[in-house]
Amino acid sequence: MTTFLIILGVIVGINLLSLLINQILLPKDLAGITPRGELLEVQGKRMHLRKMGSGALTIVLLPGLGVPLPSVDFRPLMEELAETHTVVCIEYFGYGFSDQTDTPRTNENYTEEIRESLSTLGLKPPYVLMPYSASGIYCEYYAAKYPEEVEALILLDTTSSAQKEVTLPKFTLTLSKIQNAIGFGRFLNPLLAIKLMGLHEKNGYTKQEIRELSKFTNHASNDTTNDQLLRFSKNVSEMMTLDTPKELPVLVLSAPGSAKLEKGAYLAAHLKKLGSQTKSKIIPNSNHGTIYHDRQHRLAILEAVDDFLNAKKYTSK
């Protein structure tokens, strides 16, 4: 019993110390870090968009669940795409430099926020929507509701709209908020970013960018992103009842070893739902991390995107 109480006391003490350190550092984390794009008024809140390039075709990059700072996370891919196209990264409310919002995180609201933000930035449809992970659901919904505004879809290892997702119990988000308050991630995030996610200099990220991504990770769990997580299964279910236009060109890029490809007919079901105009390519991804972080894997993405867009005889200014 004495040993147990000592161990328990050490655990509690470590958590309290981490909580104290984290609460002191949290308000200072983002001091001196400035947006690299523009903060625009969207639905009465500030939303951050980063734009590169000046091509005739506009490619819109949209982040996956929990990506802490999309405008930096996407930066190497943006620069490579921007050599021939206009490229925009949108940071949803609750992400990066964008404000949080009380507006429910539904497919409809995401779609209207995307439309308004691009219009406010001065860009006109149709767009090539290029979502990663969960954003694929919102972009498929966009294409279903406003087909005339979507030139094509390029899906980066996205969630399938052909199979229902598991609903997260609310207590998991409570645990996430507690963990976020305690701040253990503060000590693990730099290691995870470099070793597991491929966010290091050899892949084109600067030391400053890696530090910023790590700091924003401490703020990634908030009421807005938690609402997104809670509603995500319903958003997938809604999209299962809708179809993208059958004539819409779609490119599906997937990574081997990801959970998406390990679920048997997951990819096949997704491709079938998207229609006969859909093309698919497996992108090498040896570290099983984010599909576009590794430099070599980005080259494979760029090649696939160029082939796909050139097939439509798109031209740039």
Image (cartoon, rainbow, N blue to C red):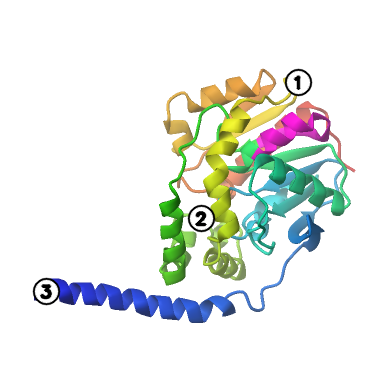
Residue positioned 71% across, 72% down in the render: 34
Q: Image quadrant for the C terminus?
A: top right
Q: CA distance from mark 3 to mark 1?
A: 68 Å
Question: Could one spot residue 215 in this view of the protein?
Answer: yes
Kind of residue sitting beneath label 3: Thr
Which sits in the foreground, 76 or 171?
171
How many neighbours does mark 3 have within 10 angstroms: few (below 14), some (14-19), or many (20 or more)?
few
| Residue appearing at x 62%, y 60% in the figure | 69
Q: Is residue 293 visible?
A: no
Q: Which mark is residue 198?
A: 2
User: Which stretch is magenta?
Assistant: 138-154
Between tags 2 and 3, which lies in front?
3
Indicate the secondary structure of the residue bearing disc 3: helix
Q: Residue at x 53, y 66 (%)?
A: 214
Which of pointers 3 and 1 indicates the residue nearer the eye? 3
Dot 1 lies on which element? loop
Magenta segment, prevailing SS (helix, strand or loop): helix
Left or right of 286 on screen, residue 282: right
As measured in the structure, the alpha-carbon distance from the residue carrying label 1 to the one carrying label 2 is 36 Å
Question: Of callouts 1 and 2, which one flags the residue occurring earlier in the amino acid sequence?
Answer: 2
